[in-house]
Image (cartoon, grey):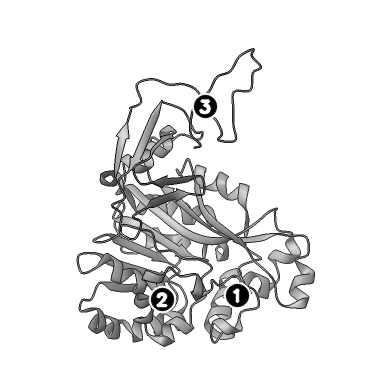
């Protein structure tokens, strides 16, 4: 049985609902921000019960946006995002599993009536072959996926397709499962572990390399949590491997560099992004408090100034003068020297 057939069988026939999963990969609804819970409550119960995601893929500031949901399954995230993009925005869901898409399609009219507008539609297709779908290049503001890239045999092709479909300044905001080392063959070839999103998990550093090869020069980790394997047989088989659910954001900005370079720039958050009045988190190392001047590297500067976040920040500086590598980014000048005086924030 091919990996594609394993996934179709597991999610189409083996799993009747979220309770059938054997790991903690699926996120707990209690982790939802309070303001999102009423929106999730408006999603049909059958759709919610067929949810198998591993994180929360609801990026801020998407009203009016065109969003693509990869591996949408029964449509939980698609219908949630549809309420956030509103009547001026749209959501396209893509999935390869007939049984899952049937649930999504069966409740599409229900959600349109409940929301007061119809802005969601679904396509059957493979996330490794996005170019085969009737979708124009550079036509999406945001692309999301929730625990599906690990199920793909060609993860590089997925990232290539995403890069092609994003507008300039667009964002790929997604959750997936990663390993702290390369997963051995006996784990990769176990059909249950593969279906549970562990067998196909990428070593995090290999993911970083794939992302950069696809044109996402500076992947940013937003949040992560360790996963547990509940089934004794599976736990024994995966002993010694650390699995994590992690959310990353990748920006479609051509000028991003593969290292954090210092141009003497800074930003100040205005506190104007909805539901983020006191601070905005770009990633695990960038939490911008409202009104506070925050020194940043050139990449972080571009991620804010050349994207939908621009109007919510004040910007200081340009790219006219380079001061070397940005201190505290995990890479520093490799040469010894007598004196070094640095005054900078954490990038």
Residue 6, disc = 1
- The residues bearing labels 2 and 1 have C-alpha atoms spaced at a distance of 22 Å
Q: Earlier in the sequence, mark 3 or mark 2?
A: 2
Query: Which residue: 29% across, 71% down?
Result: 83
Q: In this view, which residue lies farthest toward the top?
A: 338
Q: Quadrant of the N terminus?
A: bottom right
Classed neighbour count for the residue bearing mark 2: other residues with Cα under 10 Å, few (<14), some (14–19), many (≥20):
many
Front residue of 84/124: it is: 84
- The residues bearing labels 3 and 2 have C-alpha atoms spaced at a distance of 42 Å
Q: Earlier in the sequence, mark 2 or mark 1?
A: 1
Instruction: Give the percent coordinates (x, y) of residue 303.
Output: 38, 42
Report if residue 124 is visible in the image.
no
Residue 76, disc = 2
Horizontal arrangement in the rendering, residue 286 relative to residue 78 (left or right): right
Q: Which residue carries the number 3 mark?
A: 325
Horizontal arrangement in the rendering, residue 124 relative to residue 19 (left or right): left
- The residues bearing labels 3 and 1 have C-alpha atoms spaced at a distance of 46 Å
Q: Relative to 231, does residue 330 appear above or below in the rendering?
A: above
Instruction: Give the percent coordinates (x, y) of residue 59.
Output: 38, 59
Labels 3 and 2 touching (C-beta < 8 A): no
Query: Which residue: 60% across, 75% down?
Result: 6
Query: Which residue: 48% across, 84% down?
Result: 49
Res 67 → quadrant = bottom left
Horizontal arrangement in the rendering, residue 42 relative to residue 220 (left or right): left
Q: SS class of the residue under badge 1?
A: helix
Q: SS class of the residue under badge 2?
A: helix
């Amino acid at each position: 049985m091919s990996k594609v057939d394993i996934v179709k069988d597991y999610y189409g026939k083996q799993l009747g609902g979220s309770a059938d999963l054997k790991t903690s990969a699926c996120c707990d609804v209690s982790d939802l921000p309070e303001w999102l819970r009423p929106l999730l409550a408006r999603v049909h119960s059958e759709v919610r019960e067929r949810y198998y995601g591993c994180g929360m893929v609801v990026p801020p500031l998407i009203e009016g946006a065109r969003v693509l949901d990869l591996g949408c399954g029964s449509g939980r995230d698609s219908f949630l995002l549809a309420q956030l993009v509103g009547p001026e925005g749209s959501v396209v869901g893509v999935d390869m599993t007939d049984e899952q898409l049937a649930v999504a399609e069966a409740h599409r009219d229900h959600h349109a009536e409940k929301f007061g507008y119809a802005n969601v539609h679904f396509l059957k297709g493979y996330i490794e072959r996005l170019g085969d779908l009737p979708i124009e290049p550079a036509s999406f503001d945001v692309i999301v996926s929730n625990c599906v890239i690990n199920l793909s045999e060609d993860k590089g092709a997925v990232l290539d397709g995403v890069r092609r479909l994003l507008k300039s300044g667009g964002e790929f905001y997604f959750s997936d499962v990663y390993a702290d080392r390369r997963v051995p063959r006996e784990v990769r070839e176990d059909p249950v572990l593969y279906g549970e999103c562990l067998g196909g998990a990428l070593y995090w550093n290999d993911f970083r390399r794939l992302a950069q090869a696809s044109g996402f020069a500076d992947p940013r980790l937003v949040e992560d949590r360790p996963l547990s394997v509940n089934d004794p047989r599976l736990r024994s088989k995966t002993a010694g491997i650390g699995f994590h659910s992690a959310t990353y954001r990748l920006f479609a900005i051509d000028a991003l560099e593969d290292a954090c370079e210092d141009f003497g720039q800074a930003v100040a958050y205005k506190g104007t992004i909805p539901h983020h009045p006191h601070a905005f988190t770009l990633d695990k190392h960038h939490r911008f408090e409202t009104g506070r001047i925050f020194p940043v590297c050139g990449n972080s500067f571009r991620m804010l100034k050349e994207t939908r976040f621009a109007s919510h920040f004040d910007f200081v500086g340009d790219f006219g003068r380079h001061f070397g590598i940005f201190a505290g980014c995990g890479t520093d000048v490799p040469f010894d020297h007598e004196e070094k005086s640095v005054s900078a924030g954490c990038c």
